[in-house]
Amino acid sequence: MFAKTDLLPPDAILGLTKLAAADQREEKIDLGVGVYRTVDGATPIMRAVDLAEKAMIQKETTKAYTPADGAPGFCEAILKLVFGSDSEQVASGRTIAVQSPGGCGALRLAGELLARNDAAGISAGAPTWANHKPLLTAAGLNVHMTPYYDAKSSTIDFDAFITSIKKLGPGDVLLLHGACHNPTGADLSHEQIDAVTDIAAERGFLPLIDTAYHGFAANLETDAYILREMTRRLPEVLITYSCSKNFGLYRERTGAIIFAGRNSDQAAAVKSHIINIARASYSMPPAHGGAIVSEILHSREMAQIWRDELAAMNQAVRNNRKLLVDTAREAGLGNQLSYITEQNGMFSLLPLTLEDVTLLREEFAIYIVGAGRINLCGVNAGNVGHLVQSLSDVLNR
């Protein structure tokens, strides 16, 4: 059966993490894996999560299966977090959520749902998160890349993006990022979101909004603009949501797929298909993370602790962005990296080639994904000097 099975190469990001862990050089800097980290390189358990987990365990009386749509209270809480507790989207019943095994699980469910409904294909702005294409093509979709980010200017090429999506129509899907674009950090402005929404309304294509960093750009309310505005104005929107970053529940694999439709009947029908797809794959999601999120969001005290913690994490990443840009300017790189302070979230793209990235790893012990994606959480006062000097050396060769 498996005699001809070849060994596959390691995943690019996971493989890089393994290489970095094995590197014994003292000056090593790991800017690869996409998790929040403190100055000392730790990814701590959030205080709100710790409180919720303890409270949940004390109340737990069974390990029986959870409902098919997730841990009790989770879906309700996520819908209110995303759309607002008094929103029309929630009150009307035309939005539904199903808990998934992380954001990846939500994307795979979305892909299967779209394939089941004869989606013509899915378009994504280039570049996009490395795992988008594998997840969606494995579900049977054709993924097409469209212009989005201009690496030369380190800005969104909005004219090219708009020109491309005006060619889409009914049956097509447009993959959009919620706040904090991965890998570029370059988000659409509210005005640009409005323009894309106008085109979606006119052309009839379906937005699929992948939301992995809610709360890491401006704040939870502002970051939800694309989700709330598109679901307010368009007849159908799919959303994938991850609790890995904003709740720090990476290993708990907690996420959701959300659908906003024309009415409650359509929403219920779509939910039945999502549950049916999940049943044929993993049956039902892991309960633990969903129960933690539900516990936090149903407690005014814990929810406020969580919001405060998330805001502090957001500010820490922004501080790292400023630190890198200021240090680069002082080291003689001028404004080459100034765009970084205008972007959002954990990631940005440095103006590097694949050869530059290899050189930084081999000569300077600096680990960077692909052709320049860095996790700003890996930058701190103790290593920014070495990072900037190494970048200067490579960029000026």
Image: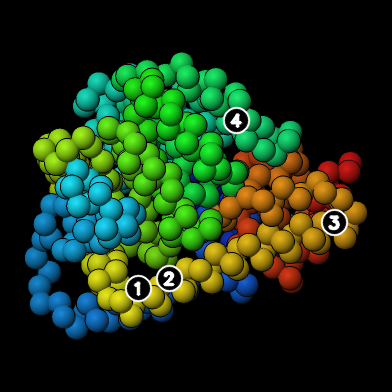
The mark nearer the N terminus, 3 or 2, is 2
The quarter of the image holding the N terminus is top left
Report which quarter residue 262 is drawn in. Answer: top left
Q: Observer-nearest residue: 133 or 304?
A: 304
Category of crowding for the residue at label 3, using alpha-carbon neighbours closer than 10 angstroms: few (below 14), some (14–19), many (at least 20) = some
Q: Observer-nearest residue: 388 or 259?
A: 259
Q: CA distance from mark 3 to mark 2?
A: 33 Å
Q: Which residue occupies 35% across, 50% down? A: 241
The mark nearer the N terminus, 4 or 2, is 4
Which is more foreground, mark 3 or mark 1? 1
Q: Disc 3 residue type?
A: Arg
Residue 252, position as x, y percentages in the image: 32, 62
User: Residue beneath label 3, please?
Assistant: 329
Q: CA distance from mark 1 to mark 4?
A: 37 Å
Q: Disc 4 residue type?
A: Phe
Tell whether 120 sits left or right of 374.
Answer: left
User: Residue beneath label 1, please?
Assistant: 303
Residue 257, position as x, y percentages in the image: 28, 46
Which is more foreground, mark 3 or mark 2? 2
Residue 158's disc number? 4
User: Residue beneath label 2, please?
Assistant: 307
Q: Is residue 183 above or below residue 389?
A: above
> Looking at the image, do the residues carrying marks 3 and 2 touch, with CB atoms under 8 Å apart?
no
